[in-house]
Amino acid sequence: MLDICAPRVKASGKDTRALQNCGIANFSLSYVFSVQGRYMAAARRATRSIKQLEAVLDADPTKVDAKLHLGLLYQYTDNLPAFVKAVGWVVWFIPRGNGQLAIPYIIEVVDHGGEYALAARFILADIHSQGNGKSPQLAEVMFAHLVKQYPGNYRLHYNDLEVLNRLGCNE
């Protein structure tokens, strides 16, 4: 993907489709590198992805689907361990998140109803199902909605049951 979009971005920094594709590709690579334990490479890719996806929205604010990956990056980088965040003020390649925009961006993708709306709804429910002051009650409502919409998807059933269990519903 980067072999296709990167030359288009280099030729014209305003090609929003190429910027978004590169942003998504760098987002994916940042995840792969972090799973592999290549944290510096992951941080560089995440930083590059944030810049590319922000450039998409600067050039065309109607590109709502770009907000899914950008919202996720903001969410994850805003919730890095405190030590990593502290080092991030000194070390330039550690990305910084914007927790104020993370959830609203993902909600906007759900509300927009574009090609990423379903994925955004699942991700939003998953974020709310985690601890850290999120809302497991809201997560349960969202997972229940997804289960009704996709009754054959057992992962959704599992997530809904897991949240119900955390809420103390043993019925």
Image (cartoon, rainbow, N blue to C red):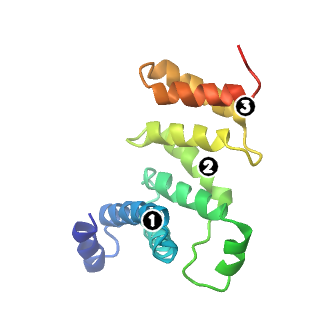
Q: Which residue is mark 1?
A: 36
The 10 Å Cα crowd at callout 1, few under 14, some 14 to 19, many 20 or more, is few
Q: Which mark is residue 166?
A: 3
Taking the spot 50% from the left edge, 45% from the top edge, the residue there is 109
Q: Position of residue 60 (x, y in %)?
A: 42, 61
Q: Classify mark 1: helix, strand or loop.
A: loop
Q: CA distance from mark 1 to mark 3?
A: 31 Å
| Numbered circle sitting on residue 111 | none
| Crowd tier of the residue under label 2, counting other residues whose Cα lies within 10 Å: few below 14, some 14–19, many 20 or above | some
In the picture shown, does residue 34 fall above or below 101? below
Q: Amino acid at mark 3?
A: Arg
**Which residue is tagged 2?**
104
Q: Nearer the viewer, mark 1 or mark 2?
A: 1
| C-alpha distance separating marks 1 and 2 | 30 Å
| Front-most of residues 105 and 158 | 158
Picture coordinates of residue 68 (x, y %)? 49, 51
Residue at point 45% right, 36% down?
118
Question: Which residue is at a point 42% across and 43% down the rendered structure image?
Answer: 116
Give x and y (percent) for residue 90: 66, 86
Where 82 falls versus 162 (above or below)?
A: below
* Mark 3 nearby-residue class (10 Å; few <14, some 14–19, many ≥20): some
| Residue, far top | 171
Q: Amino acid at mark 2?
A: Pro
Indicate the secondary structure of the residue bearing disc 2.
Answer: helix
Q: Residue at x 48, y 70 (%)?
A: 42
Callout 1, which amino acid?
Gln
